[in-house]
Amino acid sequence: MNLMMLLEMAVTAMGERVAVGPLDRGLSCDRLVGDAAALAGRLRASKAEHLVLCDEPGAVLPVSLFGAAWAGVPYVPINYRLADDDLRRLAERAAPALAVVNPSGAERLAGVDGLEIVERDALGEDPAGGAQPADLSDWPMDPDAAAVLLYTSGTSGPPKTALLRHRHLVSYVFGTVEFASAGPDEAHIMAVPPYHIASVAAQLSQVYSGRRIVPLPKFDPDSWIDLVQAQGVTHAMLVPTMLARIVDALDRRGEALESVRFVSYGGGKSHRAVVERALELFPTAGFSHAYGLTETSSTVCVMGPDDHRRWAASDDPDERARLSSTGRPLAGVEVSVRREDGTDAEPGTAGEIWVRGEQVAGEYAEGGSQLDADGWFCTRDSGHTDEAGYLWIHGRNDDLIIRGGENMSPGEIEDVLLTHPAVVDAAAFGVPSREWGEEVAVCIVARSPAPAVDDLCELVRTRLRSSRVPARVEFVDELPYNDTGKLLRRELRQRFAADPSGG
């Protein structure tokens, strides 16, 4: 298994189809192969052990991804939004490497030891005159070779390097995508950043299915809507913060998007009210809520279109609540929710989420494989299942609030608060307490007029229990998210622990 299998199959069956960009001037599958071959030749002629990408979404992404696979070196997309020092540190970790960059990246990474820089517009050039395009029949066959290195978001510490091997990513694609299944009119808008696992998975999936990729270099909800309309986009993948902003923009514009046939969202906490409104504003779209991690090669659980429409239309509160779940495991993936003693938790009981399957890598460049003897990977996420096997995500174990020795999930508190009609967004977290060790604090983004604090506390008391009632409620204009949709709970803890007044 090698990622090049996917491209070779695609070019054999759909060589003339546009793979990336506008229909009238995009990169065909044949051209994608040619550009990837040129890059692979350049990599082989260099001393590079990695291919670093520092650029926004565009045709350069699949060229770099497949070019690296062809040359037998890992693809390493890095976060171009980082501060210069942090960006350079990540690039240094990948050296010796060939770095494909935009003009800004070339300036910011200049002088990094072991880094050969080539701007994306010069990819076809061969200054040394020694690189020959790779032959389509000449790509590495080792399924255990490292294919992609992704730096984790580092929401609870310095980023680690998740290592995905070719067999993990190919297993994910084979298990979730039907080859050449897309019609010639189908197009997928690429708005998630390149250094997110969703970007890697989407590139491979769209090329393999034959669906045209329409890149959006910089996300803005109005630009996203305009591009969808201009390019006839039929498919989209979004992190929840993007979906919420698009819903707000469509409401403001008084528009709906009837051309979109499928919307997948995941990578962070989604709010049921946003999903319910999105179902109205995308009237012909099937929605899919995906849960996965970088370490699992993307999605491991899905709540599909039928479930979305069924639960949204249900009059049963328990069934309608399933819109907040992540659905059930993919075929070939096992999910186990475990108590602290390692035994399986019964439905409705919170525990630690473990996953197992061919696509699950569970490996870091710094620490090796994290799989146990039976192939299970601990996600470090907390959650629970219901009687039907639907999985709810409560949050990271590091985010647990420990009050008087009792573990509390911030996610369950947030879910209750978000049922209040005046609450737009909510974050729960622990703050130091002399009496209890930690107490529950919440930050609320609210509509005007803001709800009464007593009403919010009573809501939590009624739906959960008194120990979950916030000792402190703060109203804020917005919550801190990173650019991949992860709530930065540690920033709230640090802010309110350092300043009890919240100022």
Image (cartoon, rainbow, N blue to C red):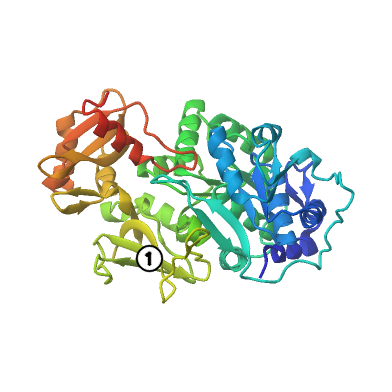
Which residue sits furthest front?
113
Residue at the disc numbered 1: 354
Which residue sits furthest left?
435
| Residue 2 x %, y % | 67, 67
| Residue 75 x %, y % | 65, 54
Quarter the C terminus occupies = top left
Q: Is residue 423 visible?
A: no
Q: Nearer the viewer, residue 469 or 178?
A: 469
Q: Nearer the viewer, residue 448 or 203?
A: 203
Figure quadrant of residue 103: top right
Residue drawn at x 68%, y 59% as measured from the top left: 73
Q: Is residue 321 left or right of residue 21?
A: left
Q: What is the three-letter code of the residue carrying label 1?
A: Trp
Crowding at mark 1 (Cα within 10 Å: few <14, some 14-19, many 20+): some
Q: Is residue 476 visible?
A: yes
Which residue sits furthest bottom?
374
Residue drawn at x 71%, y 44% as measured from the top left: 100
